């Protein structure tokens, strides 16, 4: 479709004065340069959304939600290993026949590169030391004290949370006990 521009002479004719003709020619050239107004331009085709476009968008949203749920579940499964970050084992300790009501939880964390086993001992029911000395956590072999892992004091309410360390090969030992410093009588055992 070719566009034919109207000739100025066809539009104006010959019965105008030279001054009027000059003025109209300038206006004509400006109008041609600017172009037609928007209402005279051909319409832009409108693309209607179809039923299938809506279904496709819904299917893509459903697929994205399912993929997000799978990634979240995988993260939970991979990230939730053990009883906490770097936890090797949690050992429960209880009072002996003479120290009922005592209990403790010993969280053993993964060994560091040098072979140290960082731990955290949480105790309930121990009375604060009455001058007899602090409490001690020991590894046992054949039920006897074998390697000390640290000393601690109990709070006034009988609880304590204390970081300790075992710089030993744990597989060489068979249990844990808590004693008063200088004593071999267990207050808590595994």
Image: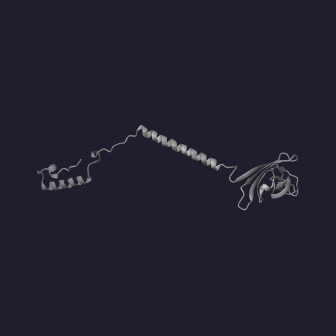
Locate residue 9 relative to residue 56 in the image: left or right.
left
Residue 134 percent location from the top left of the image: 84, 57
- Colour setup of the view: one colour
- The image quadrant of residue 139 is bottom right
Q: Quadrant of residue 69?
A: top right
In the displayed orientation, state which residue is furthest to the front.
Answer: 172
Residue 152 horizontal/vertical position (percent) = 80, 56
- Point out residue 86 in the picture as x, y percentages from the top left corner: 69, 54
Residue at 25 percent across and 54 percent down: it is 33
* Extreme-left residue of the structure: 15
Name the spot of residue 172 as percent of width and height, x first: 80, 56
Toward the viewer: 88 or 51?
88
Of 88 and 39, nearer the camera is 88
Give above or below for 49 relative to 27: above
User: Of 24 and 2, which appears nearest the observer?
Assistant: 2
User: Residue at image x 43%, y 40%?
Assistant: 53
Q: Report the residue at 74% width, 57% height from top.
A: 118
């Amino acid at each position: 479709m070719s566009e034919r521009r109207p000739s100025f002479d066809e539009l104006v004719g010959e019965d105008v004065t030279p001054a009027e003709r000059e003025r109209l020619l300038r206006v004509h050239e400006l109008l041609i340069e600017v172009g037609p107004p928007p209402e005279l331009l051909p319409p832009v085709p409108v693309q209607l959304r179809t039923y299938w476009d809506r279904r496709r968008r819904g299917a893509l949203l459903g697929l994205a939600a399912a993929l997000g749920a799978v990634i979240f579940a995988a993260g939970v499964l991979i990230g939730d290993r053990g009883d906490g970050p770097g936890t090797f084992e949690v050992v429960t300790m209880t009072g002996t026949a003479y120290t009922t009501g005592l209990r403790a939880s010993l969280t053993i964390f993964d060994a560091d590169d040098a072979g140290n086993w960082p731990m955290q001992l949480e105790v309930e029911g121990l009375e604060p030391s009455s001058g007899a000395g602090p409490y001690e956590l020991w590894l046992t072999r054949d039920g006897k004290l074998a390697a000390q892992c640290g000393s601690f004091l109990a709070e006034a309410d009988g609880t304590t949370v204390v970081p300790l360390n075992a710089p030993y090969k744990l597989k060489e030992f068979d249990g844990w006990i808590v004693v008063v410093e200088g004593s071999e009588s267990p207050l808590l055992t595994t």
